[in-house]
Image (cartoon, rainbow, N blue to C red):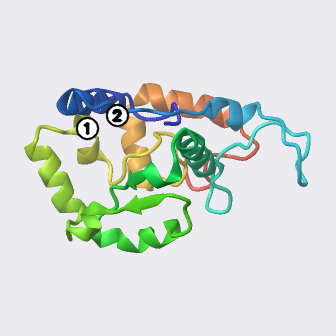
Amino acid sequence: YTTKEFPEMYDHIKKVQKMIYPLKIDTMQFDYDYYFSEHIKTKGKNKGKKGYGWCDMTMRWCTGEKKSCIRKYMRNFKKEDIVNYQGIAYDERERTKKNKFLPYRVEYPLVDWGITEKEALEYCYSKGLDWGGLYEKFHRVSCWCCPLSRLGELETLYNDFPELWQKLEEMDKKSLRKFRRDYS
């Protein structure tokens, strides 16, 4: 994880861990704040500058760091022993094409079973999983400070999570570029 997930997401992970015991959930994390504002770039036109700042459609460094954490973790296992199950739903199956060159086996059970995102959420709700109400407020639940969020979701963040909005504003002061051009 990025350390920028909603607090409710950490509670959700604990709840799932209790449900699947004795199986164990391994979590990985990278220091988002470090890469956001402290990391010294060693290449390119911004060599020597600090931090990547906000992600955008052209530079999604945070996604790259998430994938890097997973790759590092996978090195602990033999490639032939790894099966990476991803929760990509049937109605977003085009996303599975992005992973066809991974060095280990990837499975998409929701795609294989024809389960849509809506059906998967309904099933999870029926089992008592509710993400602390996050999916009732947001279309997608990712990092709370994602500049790629819909404007309506940013309004929800502002209204319902003022402490996180305040942190976002503090981060904006440290960034190379503004959070978004279409917000105030």
* Side of 114 where 180 appears, left or right: right
Q: Earlier in the sequence, mark 2 or mark 1?
A: 2
* Nearest the eye: 6 or 124: 124
Amino acid carrying label 2: it is Met
Q: Horizontal and vertical percent for residue 176?
A: 76, 43
- Residue 174 in view here: no
Contact between marks 2 and 1 (CB within 8 A): the answer is yes
User: Which residue lies at the image location 55% right of the left edge and 50% below the top edge?
Assistant: 147
Q: Is residue 41 above or below residue 101?
A: above
Q: What residue sits 42% from the left and 60% below the top? A: 106
Rendered view: 40 above or below 46: above
User: Closest to the observer: 114 or 77?
Assistant: 77
* Quarter where residue 30 is shown: top right
What amino acid does circle 1 point to? Trp
As drawn, the label of residue 139 is none
- Residue 93 in percent (x, y) is at 36, 72
The image shows residue 2, relative to residue 111, as above or below, that is: above
Left or right: 69 as drawn, with respect to 161: right
Decide which of 57, 19 is in the foreground and name it: 19
Q: Which residue is mark 2?
A: 9
Dot 1 alpha-carbon crowd within 10 angstroms: few under 14, some 14 to 19, many 20 or more: many
- Report if residue 72 is visible in the image: yes
The residue tagged 1 is 131
For this rendering, which residue is in front, 46 or 129? 129
Residue 129: image x %, image y %?
18, 39
CA distance for labels 2 and 1: 6 Å
Mark 2 residue crowding within 10 angstroms, few (<14) / some (14–19) / many (20+): some
Q: Residue at x 91, y 40 (%)?
A: 48
Question: Residue 76, position in %: x, y?
Answer: 55, 38
> Looking at this rendering, what residue extends furthest in the left direction?
126
Please give left or right for residue 146 compared with residue 83 in the image: right
Please report the residue visible at 29 percent of the width from the left and 26 percent of the height from the top. 14
